[in-house]
Image (spheres, coloured by chain):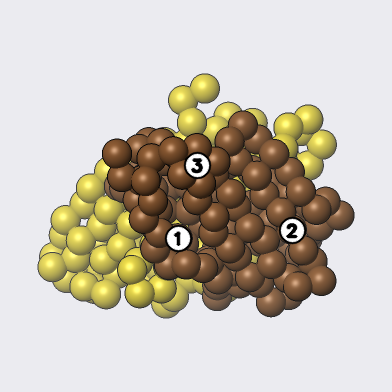
Chain colours: A brown, B yellow
Amino acid sequence: SQQGEEDPQALSIQEGENATMNCSYKTSINNLQWYRQNSGRGLVHLILIRSNEREKHSGRLRVTLDTSKKSSSLLITASRAADTASYFCATGGNDYKLSFGAGTTVTVRA
Amino acid sequence: DAGVIQSPRHEVTEMGQEVTLRCKPISGHDYLFWYRQTMMRGLELLIYFNNNVPIDDSGMPEDRFSAKMPNASFSTLKIQPSEPRDSAVYFCASRAALGGGTNTDTQYFGPGTRLTVL
């Protein structure tokens, strides 16, 4: 079953703009991860944030986590055409499983 | 490191035929996961193994699905008999064991097998 729900389902932006997508989940978590999937490819891990962390950065990526609201956001700054992909949040508990959301499809226009 | 390897990349078969999907995890990873991705249901976990032992197969949809991991470097997912509703992309992923010194919560995905059952 899907734990995370991403919002929006789809996002279209101009190259150079920032892209923000959100993830909400229902149950308590150990960590929350974001993955990227290019068309026809497997998922690639982007960033992980643990339940006791509030914000994390990796290059042009910034992730926030609000456990009181059971939500997370992923910000991609200065987007590039190569950022065009689907982005998934995944919640991890203590059972080594990940539960994925339905994803946000991001299109970066040149 | 070659990453997670899956074969075949594409499989087209007819309803009723047996299908076998294969996966080679990253060397040294102790956990292996099989997922199915469809437009309707998204990414679903089917089964996962730890040290070659199936831990949770609650996501396996029916008895027609079975998975094995005979050794640390090989796993199979078999569908017999296949049905058109089994058409999906099947992913294999692996992760390191606890204390592996790396980000052990990260899963590394293979490129997937696109299965079409006619």
Choose the circle earlier in sequence order: 2 or 3.
3
Classed neighbour count for the residue bearing mark 2: other residues with Cα under 10 Å, few (<14), some (14–19), many (≥20)? many
Q: Secondary structure at mark 2?
A: strand
Q: Secondary structure beneath disc 3?
A: strand
Query: Residue A65 shows which numbered tag?
Result: 2
Name the mark nearer the viewer: 1 or 3.
1
* Mark earlier in primary sequence (1, 2): 2
Q: Tag 1, which secondary structure? A: strand
State left or right for residue B57 relative to residue A39: right
Give the image location of residue B114, x and y in percent.
27, 53
Q: Chain of mark 3?
A: A
Counting from the top left corner in percent of width and height, residue B78 is at 36, 59
Residue at image location 35% in from the left, 66% down from the top: B38
Q: Chain of mark 1?
A: A
Image point (67%, 61%), residue name: A72
Residue under numbered circle 3: A44
- Gap between marks 1 and 2 measured at Cα: 17 Å
The residue located at (58%, 63%) in the rendering is: A22
Question: What label sits on residue A104 in the rendered view?
Answer: 1
Q: Amino acid at mark 3?
A: Val
